[in-house]
Amino acid sequence: MSGDGLPRDDRAWPRGSFVVSAVLVLIAVGSSVAFVVAAADRGALQAALVAGGFLVAFGYGLAVAVPAMRRAIAGRDLPARLTLLQFAGVVVAFVVMGFAGGVGGAMLTGLIGGLLIANMWAIRKARANRSVVNAYEASLPPTPAVDEPPARDVDVLGPALRLAVSQDGRRSLAWVLALAVVVVGSAALDVPDRVLGFVVLVGVLPVGWVLRRLVAGWLALRDLNKGTTPRRAYVVLLHDPAPRMIRPLLGVWADPPVPRGGRLPKPERVWIYGGAYVIGGASQPEFDGANLARDGGVVVVTFNYRLGVEGFAQITGAPPNRGLLDQVAALEWVRANIAAFGGDPEEVTVFGQSAGAGSIAALLAMPRAAGLFRRAVVQSMPGTYFSTELAADIASACAAKLGLRPVVADLADVDPELLVLAADNVTATMADRAERWGQPAHRSIPFAPVVDGEVLPTTPWQALAAGAGRDIDLLAGHTRDEHRLFTVFTGFLGEVTPEQARTALRIFGPDDGRYQDAGPDELYELVHSDWLFRMPTLHLAEAQVAGGGRAHFYELTWPAPGMGGVLGACHGLDVPLVFGNLTSGQPAVLIGDNPTAEAVALSRKMRAAWTRFASHGDPGWPAYDADRRLTQVFDTSPALTPYPEEMSRLIWQDHAFLPHPVVAPRP
């Protein structure tokens, strides 16, 4: 298995299933021909009725099965094999046809033929898709295995059995049963052949309606009593302009859908991961959405997007902000396809942390993303957005490491790994260019969304203050000790000198910023926390309110128990708590080896609040406003208070987060 849970070979689609399906199709067609020949002895009209019945049922079988197969092939649950149970079902159906004969038998063979041909098509398509994915995955380094619920094959079933794990397939089970019941009943009552076709066509409608209701009720009751295991599906998309960059791009966690009428459509939560716009992936175990889908009654979607040079470098001849455009494409896919997974395309909530939160803030300001989501959750949003001049200057430096120019003609055929290495080289020496590149260079931040005037017309704060998010519900917040994680990893914890603290304040603090009674360590962390995450997030909520929108705010103050408790309520602590993945993935290190009852309880509270917000737009506490500034504080004992970081709020209240410019002319 690969790290994203997809098999690396095509053993899941044995050739036997295709051959068995082909043989059964030939038997079905041969049986129908025999029915037509037998009917011809009783007149041309009877033969025409038998042949017509076969063709109508054959077309219906295809119409029912092919859409279900398409959805299955688009996901991880690919049609795998014709099981013994399915084969037995087909044999029983043929026995029934032998007794029925006439129009009814021809219709039943036609239905079987359509279903089986769809099965054959699905198997061939699945093999073709797998060969493409295998070719890409063979070029990847090994990735650690991910613990997931075992994949279940989608069964492609004959009459009287389930057709596929889809709403249409489950609902059509009732119609297949109805057809079988009417044909068998007509044969048992010795209905004359000359009226058998009419009896079948008329009888299927009321019987099918009744059985459809019974099937829907049975499935809903079964799911209620036994519970369901969320399943994950993948969609493979191609990226332009480099078709070789094919990757499992999108993951879905959802309960197996039930027929319409059995369950209302669910809201969706679409996760956008962080990683400073240079690292990350949707297949990381900490982003497994099974807990959220199971406990929250929602459909969870994650996806990859282009990062680094590919996603955010300013390249002449290529669209800017390609990483953001990938996110728009994924949201468009959700709107068009999520109903097939039981979701409601009108109830989409995007949620993300760090660079994922910065991406969501950018989406709020992007005309191309308008109408693609109804709610947004912004967790620890960074304040870095680049001007086109700065982005182009950094792109030039990256291309120069390869002896190239930052234009499509030069970079289109470059190995993506070389682009990564070039960007890493530039990042490692950014501090030497601080006089030209300003604050991002001091923090070694080479990439960020670019305020280009078209894809991203303005900064998120300006857009929301002007009313761009007025129709979007916003939940925003940050952790208390955002920078502590970076302080620990850089070896500065307890080692900050007064000069280093003053330098941090001079570079990153507001012009009139004064942090009262703060020692060197506290001042260093406060300035970096406020500049990087806390104040950009707070200002986004305030801009939303100023623009006539609605926002709820929170702060996570519960200290991370991992690594001896030195990290406090650090950056990234909210991720395992929100997903409920307290023992898997890198952020689980913050929780510790054995999650305490306190951690489990806090995670449950945060997941419940996020789910309420995704479902109703209300996380369970009053909205933020300019007067009371009510904030939900998540700790051992959650509390609702005025914004807790009042000193920082006052220091930064007149600061404007603008696109970072080139601060000095080129020498």
Image: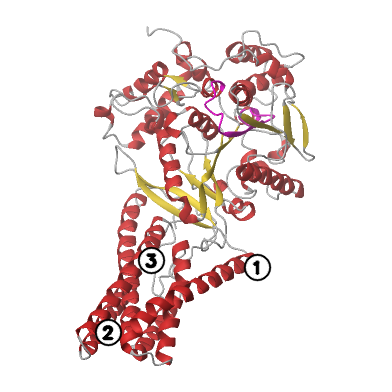
Mark 2 and mark 3: span between their CA atoms? 22 Å
Question: Residue 559, position in %: x, y?
Answer: 73, 36
- What stretch of residues is rendered in magenta? 465-486
Q: Is residue 217 magenta?
A: no
Q: Earlier in the sequence, mark 3 or mark 1?
A: 3
120 sits left or right of 435 in the view: left
Where is residue 111 shown, x and y percent of the image?
Answer: 34, 75
Q: Which residue is mark 2?
A: 31
Q: Nearer the viewer, residue 613 or 635?
A: 613
Three-letter code for the amino acid on which mark 1 is drawn: Asn
What amino acid is at disc 3? Answer: Val
Q: Which label's residue is closer to the chain start, 1 or 2? A: 2
Assign a secondary structure to mark 2: helix
Point out residue 59 in the picture as x, y percentages from the top left corner.
31, 69
Proximity of marks 3 and 1: CB atoms separated by less than 8 Å: no
Q: Which residue is mark 3?
A: 64
In the figure, 457 relative to 286: above or below?
above
Residue 390: image quadrant is top left
Residue 596 is marked as none
Q: Nearer the viewer, residue 639 or 469?
A: 469
Q: Secondary structure at mark 3?
A: helix
Q: Which residue is mark 1?
A: 225
